Image (tube, rainbow, N blue to C red):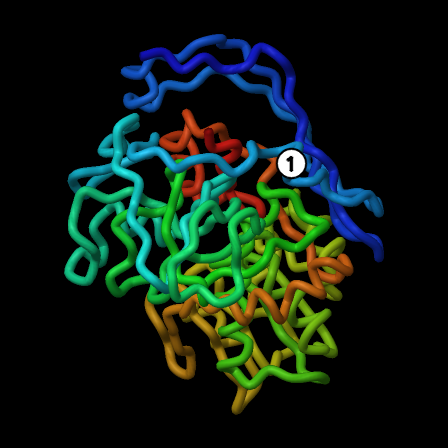
């Protein structure tokens, strides 16, 4: 089998709504024209050149789904998907054209996947970090999805065929995540875990939001964060951190938002609403004179994070060892959270941040995994389009 990649120079649409949202635009040029199935599985990739991340403002609406995805059609019995039958490195990922399309339960909808996104938990799952509570192998990975409903179960109450939706398909991230994930042409998910896609976002932007924005929101809620409080976000340019910044400022009413990033990402932090952008390559948290009500550690430096929190404050630690008074939680997928935040997304107060090296085409899922595992992604690593 040969997967023929386009010869043209595709461009990501700049899509936002007022007031003054962030737009992430990039261009890539592809020099290779074809990839064989064997080269895809080995993780080979053509050469790409990228333009830098650009932030701009626009009020242009998203292109209707009819221009982005095919009309609802009969659902086939088999689909293309990425699969692994054993735990391990990126090399265990295999492309399979004959994976059975999942059957839906009465409370589920079947989604024709248009875009998906990767999260650190995807890599940890593939590595077998929580195999004791994982679903049986083989696994189609993927938590985040954006697409179109093509079939509804008998118990579905609100969604209907043709609805454009997005969500995190696994209610409990580490406890029995679905065997058939979102890195496939179709995925099945409970109605309660998804929401209608924000009208001003395209599928690629929407796919990058669910797990990260739910994690950011739940973490802030668990700390009791509220208007007038201050917060420091470690790894503010990452998928979760970039959304913690925006939620703290635009939804929770933070009095001050500080965040850390490397030198080249400081302007991004400022564009997201950060009051104090800290270059972690030049400044130490231990040397900060100011202390914060909440420190949200999205990188795994809890031992340093606790030194920047006020007495009686809270420290959220998403990964790595936890140092008191820090705490860790595992996010619960909840479509109601997405529904609650949709107005902020549609007004432009909250913005989707997609890494400028993406979206990665479906043929390059292995490369996308390798990239997210460098821990250097800006915002979210998105897979789009998915055939």
Q: Based on the displayed image, in which of its 4 quarters is residue 209 positioned?
A: bottom right
Q: Is residue 287 above or below residue 238?
A: below
- Residue occupying the point 62% across, 33% down: 68
**Which residue is more in the foreground, 296 or 15?**
15
> Can I make out residue 281 in this image?
no
SS under mark 1? helix
- Residue occupying the point 68% across, 37% down: 53
Q: Is residue 228 above or below residue 42?
A: below
Query: Can you give x and y, in whole percent of width and height, for residue 338 in the image?
Result: 57, 65
Q: Is residue 183 above or below residue 222?
A: above
**Which residue is more in the foreground, 289 or 372?**
372
Residue labelled with disc 1: 66
Q: Is residue 275 left or right of residue 137?
A: right
Query: Can you give x and y, in whole percent of width and height, for residue 126 in the image?
Result: 26, 45
Q: Is residue 184 above or below residue 280?
A: above
Among all residues in the image, which is located at the extreme bottom?
Answer: 312
- Residue occupying the point 18% across, 42% down: 138
Badge count: 1
The quadrant of the picture occupied by the N terminus is top left
Query: Can you give x and y, in whole percent of width and height, for residue 247 in the image?
Result: 65, 68
**Which residue is more in the foreground, 35 or 54?**
35
| Other residues around mark 1 within 10 Å, as few (<14) / some (14–19) / many (≥20) | few
**Which residue is more in the foreground, 11 or 356?**
11
């Amino acid at each position: 089998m040969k997967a023929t990649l386009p010869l043209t120079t595709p461009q990501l649409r700049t899509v936002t709504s007022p007031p003054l949202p962030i737009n992430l635009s990039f261009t890539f040029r592809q020099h290779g024209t074809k990839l064989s199935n064997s080269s895809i599985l080995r993780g080979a990739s053509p050469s790409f050149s990228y333009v830098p991340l650009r932030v701009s403002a626009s009020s242009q609406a998203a292109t209707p789904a009819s221009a982005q995805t095919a009309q609802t059609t009969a659902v086939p019995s088999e689909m293309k998907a990425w699969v692994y039958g054993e735990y391990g490195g990126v090399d265990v990922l295999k492309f399979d054209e004959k994976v059975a399309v999942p059957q839906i339960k009465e409370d589920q909808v079947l989604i024709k996947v248009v875009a998906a996104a990767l999260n650190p938990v995807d890599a940890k799952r593939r590595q077998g970090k929580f195999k004791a509570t994982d679903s049986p192998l083989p696994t189609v990975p993927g938590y985040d999805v954006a697409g179109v409903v093509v079939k509804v179960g008998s118990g579905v109450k609100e969604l209907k065929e043709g609805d454009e939706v997005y969500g995190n398909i696994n209610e409990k991230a580490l406890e029995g995540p679905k065997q058939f994930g979102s890195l496939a042409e179709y995925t099945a998910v409970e109605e309660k875990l998804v929401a209608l896609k924000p009208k001003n976002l395209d599928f690629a932007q929407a796919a990058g939001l669910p797990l990260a924005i739910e994690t950011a929101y739940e973490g802030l809620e668990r700390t009791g964060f509220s208007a007038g409080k201050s917060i420091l976000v470690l790894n503010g340019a990452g998928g979760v951190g970039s959304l913690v910044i925006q939620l703290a400022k635009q939804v929770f009413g933070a009095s001050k938002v500080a965040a850390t990033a490397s030198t080249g990402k400081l302007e991004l932090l400022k564009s997201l609403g950060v009051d104090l952008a800290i270059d972690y390559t030049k400044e130490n948290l231990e040397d900060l004179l100011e202390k914060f009500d909440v420190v949200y550690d999205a990188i795994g430096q809890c031992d340093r994070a606790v030194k920047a929190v006020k007495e009686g404050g809270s420290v959220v630690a998403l990964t790595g060892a936890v140092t008191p008074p820090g705490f860790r939680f595992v996010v619960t997928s909840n479509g109601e959270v997405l529904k609650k935040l949709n107005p902020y997304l549609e007004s432009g107060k909250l913005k989707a941040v997609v890494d400028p090296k993406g979206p990665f085409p479906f043929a390059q899922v292995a490369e996308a995994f390798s990239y997210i595992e460098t821990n250097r992604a800006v915002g979210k690593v998105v897979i789009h389009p998915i055939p």
